[in-house]
Image: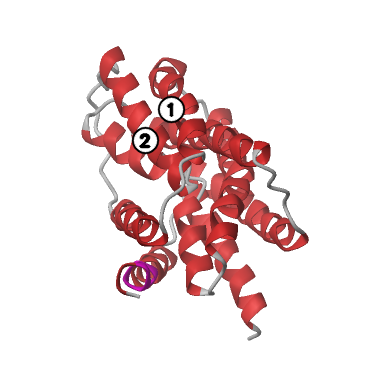
Amino acid sequence: MDSQLLLLFALGVVAFLYASVGHGGASGYLAVLALFGTRPELMKSSALILNLFVSMSSFVQFYRGGHFRWEKFWPFAAASIPMAFVGAGIPLNPGLYKQLLGFCLLLAIARILWRPKETEDEPKPVPLAAGLAVGAVIGLLSGMLGIGGGIILSPVLLLMHWARLKETAAISAIFIFVNSVSGLSKLLMKGYVPDEQTLTWLAVAFVGGLLGGYAGARKFTVPVLRYALALGLFVATLKLLFT
């Protein structure tokens, strides 16, 4: 298979699987682009653009299913949006960028493989101070790396029992969207203009995201693809950390 067709296929699969759990997939896109030798300066901006459309398509599906909770979303977003804007303007040397991205990919692998059980217990409210603090840290890191931050927020919501599974997916999806808008706006202010190649990637990821969001909102799972994606992310992590 031609390398470009293989790249498009990989991006579509990543979009499908991430959207099925309410994520935009930036960490996955970055992993795929790294494996195919994409220029680092193109990776960050492209991942944010793909994030926008995939996360929104995923959010719409979970929102229509009645899973979004505004009161659990806004404390994180209030701090993350401005910090993502700040983070997008912070230059990172290639070595540090690869290390931080590798760490986020490990989180992505854990989230893909971790299938927490839904409980009957009522989720706890999100403490305002904790929500703002968590949002600020995730927002800054998101802007610096070109991710939406959902891969970090999602396990926090579940481990702290602040949201149910489907609520977590809905909150993470829109959280990724607003952070991606914030980070991308900073890059656009610095003169970034999407090229034709990025728009092609976007079209493929958008279709994958629509299908994944629809599947995830209806409790559809694809274990074989999840394991394949986790393996691919692990290979990309090794490449980032040790090359």
Farthest residue to the bottom: give it.
Answer: 1
Seen from the viewer's position, the closer of residues 191 and 201 is 191
**Who's the residue at 24% across and 28% down the image?**
161
Instruction: Please identify the quarter of the rendering in which residue 155 is found.
Output: top left
State which region is magenta. 236-240
Q: Amino acid at mark 2?
A: Ile
SS assignment for the magenta stretch, majority: helix
Residue 28 position within the rendered picture, expressed as x and y whole percent measured from the top left: 46, 58
Residue under circle 2? 138
Let me know if residue 41 is in the magenta part: no
Residue under circle 1? 80
Q: Relative to residue 77, is residue 108 depicted above or below?
A: below
The C terminus, quarter of image: bottom left
Seen from the viewer's position, the closer of residues 211 and 157 is 157
Marked residue nearer the N-terminal end (2 or 1):
1
Dot label at residue 72: none
Instruction: Please identify the quarter of the rendering in which residue 78 is found.
Output: top left
In contact (CB < 8 Å): disc 2 and disc 1: yes
Label 2 crowd (10 A; few <14 / some 14-19 / many >=20) = many
3D distance between C-alphas at marks 2 and 1: 6 Å
Farthest residue to the right: give it.
Answer: 196
